[in-house]
Each structure stands twice: as C-alpha cells, then as structure tokens.
Image: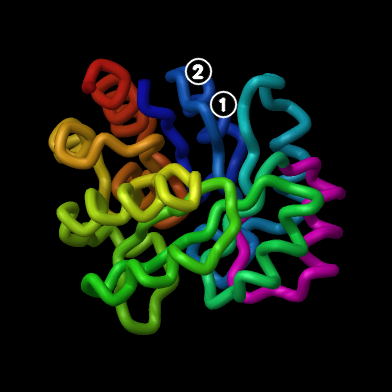
C-alpha cells in the first residue's frame, strides 16, 4: 500500500487532522516558504503526535550543524533535503537520520542526479524556476516511471510529489506506482492552512488505489 506524506504542516489542528485521516508522515518546512515553521513551533506539534507518525524536516542548502540541531531539538525521524545538497553532504547526515533527497524534475536530464546519491528515498517534485517545492504544478509522470528504474539500481524508493491533489491522486498512483505520495499546496485553503476535507479525500483515495 502506498504511503502518504502530508507536507507543509504549520499548526497542530492540521497535523491532528492528517493523523486522524490516516497519514503516515508529516513534513515540516524549515526553509524559506509560505509554509515555513519555526523549530519551537514544530517541536510543540511533534511532541503531541502519535508515535507511529514519521516526522520529516524539510531543509534547503542549510548548514549541516544547524540541520542536526533542529533535528535533535524537534526529534525528527527523517530529513528531506530539497536544494542542491551534494552526495557527500547527504552521506554525512545519513549517519544520523534517514535521508530523502528531493529532485526537481526538468526533463530526463534531471534524473541523472539520482545516480550519485546514497539516500533512503528520492522525492520527485516539479521544477519551477525560482521556487523550491509547494508549487502546485505537476510534471510528466512518465519521467517518474523512469526514475523508479534508476531508484531500484541504488535501492532507494521513489516518493511522488508535485501538484498532487484529491482530483489526480488516483491517476498518479496507477500510472507511477510510487512507494509514497507527498502533497502540500494541493490540499490547502490558503498557503500554510490545510483544507481538512481535501486532506481526508486525498488520503482515502490514495489508500484505495493500487
């Protein structure tokens, strides 16, 4: 069964709703974004979550020591690196945490980046110039199918992101068959505020689709 990550959590009500509806993981953005959250606020939310929920910190080209401090303070389970982090950078952090390396897909050439990384999973997101994630725009899912083949070679599963919402999630899963799906802006009423009806429908559809 495909795993579901709800990203861009900024408040406890949204976190609680996502957990109640059956999310497997929640993402907290510590980089410049309309969904950015402070470490203290994330810590307060995370300590109230059920123990089975995987907590993911999203960082963009951040200093390693700062990443590790936030991860420790917030008791994160996993780090999602969404910038131009090198294979060496990821390898160092992988000594302490599970690592998701995000790749912004901009044609087949983007997929070459998967080959050099030793990480726990790749997250495929849409490339939009000047923006890092949360764009609400999907990319060509045929490239995600190609990425899965590369991912298998390095033993890292693929997480599909980029413009996913309750309308297209079933088609996305059927076509790509990813390890997990990740949604953020497609589930919002306004930037940083989740629409609980959208979250519920998204998770329900993801669960029943194979």
Comparing 199 with 152, the one in front is 152
Q: Is residue 28 magenta?
A: no
User: What is the quadrant of residue 202 in the picture?
Assistant: top left
Left or right for 164, reference 19: left
User: What is the quadrant of residue 114 in the picture?
Assistant: bottom left
Comparing 3 with 187, the one in front is 3
Residue at horizontal 36 percent and vertical 55 percent from the top = 150
Q: Secondary structure at mark 1?
A: helix
Could you tell me residue 79's position as x and y percent? 65, 52
Left or right for 121, reference 162: right
Could you tell me residue 111's position as x and y percent? 33, 67
The stretch in magenta equals: 57-76
Residue 20 badge: 2
Which quarter of the figure is the C terminus placed in?
top left
Could you tell me residue 165's position as x and y percent? 25, 42
Residue at horizontal 62 percent and vertical 27 percent from the top = 53
Q: Residue furthest bottom?
A: 130
Residue 16 badge: 1
Q: Is residue 62 magenta?
A: yes
Q: In the rendered structure, are the residues bearing label 1 and label 2 in contact, judged by CB atoms less than 8 Å apart?
A: yes
Graded by Cα atoms within 10 Å as few (under 14), some (14 to 19) or many (20 or more), the crowding at tag 1 reads some
**Gap in angstroms between the C-alphas marked 1 and 2:** 6 Å
Left or right for 36, reference 107: right
């Amino acid at each position: 069964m495909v795993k579901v990550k709800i990203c861009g959590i900024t408040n406890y009500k949204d976190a609680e709703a996502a957990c109640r509806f059956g999310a497997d993981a929640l993402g907290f953005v510590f980089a410049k974004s309309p969904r950015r959250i402070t470490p203290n606020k994330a810590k307060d939310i995370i300590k109230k979550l059920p123990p089975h929920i995987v907590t993911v910190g999203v960082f963009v080209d951040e200093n390693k020591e700062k990443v590790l401090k936030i991860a420790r303070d917030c008791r994160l389970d996993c780090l999602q690196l969404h910038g131009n982090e090198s294979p060496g950078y990821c390898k160092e952090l992988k000594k302490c945490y599970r690592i998701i390396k995000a790749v912004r897909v901009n044609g087949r050439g983007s997929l070459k980046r998967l080959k050099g990384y030793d990480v726990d999973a790749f997250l495929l997101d849409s490339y939009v110039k000047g923006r890092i994630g949360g764009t609400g725009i999907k990319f060509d899912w045929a490239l995600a199918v190609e990425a899965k083949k590369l991912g298998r070679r390095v033993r890292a599963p693929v997480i599909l992101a980029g413009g996913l919402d309750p309308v297209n999630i079933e088609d996305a899963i059927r076509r790509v068959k990813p390890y997990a799906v990740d949604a953020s802006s497609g589930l919002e009423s306004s930037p940083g505020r989740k629409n609980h009806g959208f979250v519920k429908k998204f998770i329900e559809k993801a669960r029943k689709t194979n």
